[in-house]
DNA sequence: CACATAAATGAGATACTATATCATTGCAAG
DNA sequence: CTTGCAATGATATAGTATCTCATTTATGTG
């Protein structure tokens, strides 16, 4: 069993590594990890959960930055476009990516009790969606795979 | 290859059958397919595409019904809860269900060019999500599986 | 360096999506 | 009949996302 967000782990380390990897990748690709973008990624890494754009804006405001909605949405566009963060459609929210930056098709497990989200990597054109697409002659460009349910810890305490 | 929304078909027939099935199912289950709920389902069947709640409201208004947002959202809640319609998370929109009403885990292929949506049925705990869930000890209650791309017709005309 | 260009930011307004609340109505079981 | 529950009507408000335009900052080229 691989490590997931439901496990405990050294969180400071995971923030530092996430930022370092993003910086390295941006330098290599000629992308600009500007202060605003970097800070939003850092917030997502710190919180380690799905956050709404306005949650992020609140954090930015608390830090004295100007924080109109487009500030957050622009940064999030950059981060999601380049794979540093993902959008959780079901929650209208965003999470820092738990993996390397190269192109991937993420799948998410969303705990409805504690709101934590864990990410797994899958083949973009694999599984049911891939099979349905091939049957219909459909060309897949992006996939959304999200499961809502209970994580191991919450399944014990809230069996409802 | 099974029939999909991307194929042509006798659409009048498919509306009539959808409504008839919903009525039969509601009668059997003691559910109330009230005029508002029935009309919203009919609109979704007629349009045969994903519609936002406010698109539906516009149609209702044009027909002279009072149409505050809760009217549409309540009807959509009923329809999605009982499997007569599905929510497309990626589009914040709704489609009539293309299948029987019993519990199912739908997967959707969304054409970004023509906005048509086709539905396939899959196993709720199957595929990548099921595998990831078992590995993490996660209990799946609901799944979202959506692919964005190009349908066969649009792939020819808009290769971009 | 000076300039042209492109990318990013700042700021305000607005559009789109969804829910809370409370009063009222209709239906159905006891 | 009346009690209780489900559904509706209506108003307000919350939450999410984008448009537009002016300004600044970085980059590259002569």
Image (spheres, coloured by chain):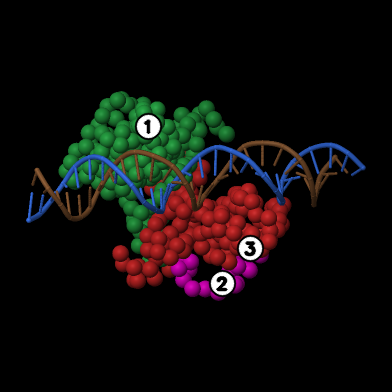
Chain colours: A green, B red, C brown, D blue
Q: Is residue B13 left or right of residue B110?
A: right
Residue A35 part of the magenta segment: no
The subunit letter for the residue under badge 3 reads B
Identify the residue at horizontal 47%, vertical 50% (top origin).
B89
Please name the residue that numbered disc 2 is placed on.
B11
Give the CA distance from mark 2 to mark 1: 51 Å
Q: Are marks 2 and 1 in contact (CB under 8 Å)?
A: no
The answer to which of B46 and A138 lies nearer the viewer is: B46
Q: Are marks 3 and 1 in contact (CB under 8 Å)?
A: no
Label 2: how many Cα within 10 Å (few below 14, some 14–19, many 20+) = few
The subunit letter for the residue under badge 1 reads A
Please name the residue that numbered disc 1 is placed on.
A60
Please name the residue that numbered disc 3 is placed on.
B62
Give the CA distance from mark 3 to mark 1: 43 Å
Above/below status of B56 relative to B70: below
Label 3: how many Cα within 10 Å (few below 14, some 14–19, many 20+) = few
Identify the residue at horizontal 55%, vertical 74% (top origin).
B10
Q: Is residue C16 left or right of residue B158?
A: right
What span is colored magenta in the figure?
B3-21
**Callout 3: helix, strand or loop?**
helix
Of labels 2 and 3, earlier in sequence is 2
Q: Quadrant of the C terminus of chain B?
A: bottom left
Residue B4 part of the magenta segment: yes
Identify the residue at horizontal 36%, vertical 40% (top origin).
A71
**Callout 2: helix, strand or loop?**
helix
The answer to which of A153 and A40 lies nearer the viewer is: A40
């Amino acid at each position: 069993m691989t490590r997931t967000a439901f496990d405990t782990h050294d969180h400071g380390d995971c923030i530092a590594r996430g930022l370092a990897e993003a910086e390295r990748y941006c330098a290599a690709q000629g992308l600009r990890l500007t202060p605003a973008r970097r800070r939003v990624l850092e917030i997502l890494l710190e919180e380690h959960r799905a956050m709404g754009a306005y949650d992020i804006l609140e954090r930015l405001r608390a830090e004295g930055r100007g924080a109109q909605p487009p500030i957050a949405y622009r940064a999030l566009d950059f981060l999601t476009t380049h794979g540093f963060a993902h959008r959780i459609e079901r929650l209208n929210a965003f999470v820092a990516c738990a993996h390397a930056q190269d192109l991937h098709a993420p799948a998410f497990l969303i705990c409805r009790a504690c709101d934590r989200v864990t990410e797994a990597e899958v083949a973009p054109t694999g599984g049911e969606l891939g099979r349905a697409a091939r049957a219909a002659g459909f060309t897949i460009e992006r996939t959304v795979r999200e499961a809502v349910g209970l994580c191991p810890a919450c399944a014990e305490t809230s069996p409802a």
